[in-house]
Image: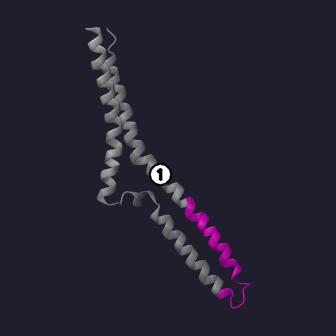
């Protein structure tokens, strides 16, 4: 049984292309979700500290602080919902055209370079 380098390369390329598509379509949105939610939580912590200081300010009081905390919590929940994984898929067509290019073009470039190298190598060996 002869060793078929080109057939092995085609299969290896197919596996890596599928892994690249999974990375772009699943792992990137998850990473974006985690970063966005972390940013929203940090922002909420900063705003909570400001709300807690309202109780000691002149003209402040418990009701002002409670309203501030309610508003801050609502903003945080809205930000967490905006950065959720399911909302990542609700983007306009321009984003998905770019995403499709990011998924398709790099593997095509790698495959084209391999085909060109193989063509050049065959020119030297024949």
Outermost right residue? 56
The image shows residue 8, relative to residue 62, as above or below, that is above
x, y (%) of residue 49? 68, 73
| Residue 46 found in image quarter | bottom right
x, y (%) of residue 64? 64, 86
The image shows residue 119, relative to residue 83, as above or below, that is above
At horizontal 34% and vertical 23% (from top left) the residue drawn is: 9
At horizontal 32% and vertical 40% (from top left) the residue drawn is: 105
Outermost bottom residue? 59
The quadrant of the rendering that contains the N terminus is top left
Q: Is residue 40 a member of the stretch shown in magenta?
A: yes
At horizontal 63% and vertical 82% (from top left) the residue drawn is: 66
| Residue 23 found in image quarter | top left
State how many labels appear.
1
x, y (%) of residue 39? 56, 61
Q: How did the renderer colour the structure? A: one colour
59 horizontally vs 22: left or right: right
At horizontal 49% and vertical 70% (from top left) the residue drawn is: 78
The quadrant of the rendering that contains the C terminus is top left
Question: Is disc 1 surrounded by few (<14), some (14 to 19) or many (20+) residues within 10 Å?
Answer: some
Residue segment shown in magenta: 38-63
Predominant secondary structure, magenta span: helix
82 horizontally vs 7: left or right: right
> Which of these two is toward me, 122 or 92?
122
122 horizontally vs 56: left or right: left
SS assignment at label 1? helix
Q: Is residue 122 a member of the stretch shown in magenta?
A: no
| Residue 53 found in image quarter | bottom right
What residue is shown with label 1?
30
x, y (%) of residue 54? 69, 82
The image shows residue 19, relative to residue 126, as above or below, that is below
């Amino acid at each position: 049984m002869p060793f078929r380098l080109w057939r092995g390369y085609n299969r290896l390329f197919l596996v890596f292309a599928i892994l690249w598509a999974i990375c772009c379509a699943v792992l990137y949105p998850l990473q974006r979700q985690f970063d966005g939610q972390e940013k929203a939580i940090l922002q909420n912590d900063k705003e909570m500290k400001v709300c807690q200081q309202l109780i000691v300010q002149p003209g402040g009081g418990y009701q002002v602080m409670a309203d501030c905390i309610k508003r801050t919590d609502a903003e945080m929940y809205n930000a967490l919902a905006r950065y959720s994984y399911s909302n990542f898929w609700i983007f306009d067509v321009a984003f998905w055209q770019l995403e499709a290019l990011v998924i398709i073009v790099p593997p095509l470039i790698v495959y084209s370079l391999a085909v060109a190298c193989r063509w050049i190598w065959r020119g030297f060996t024949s």
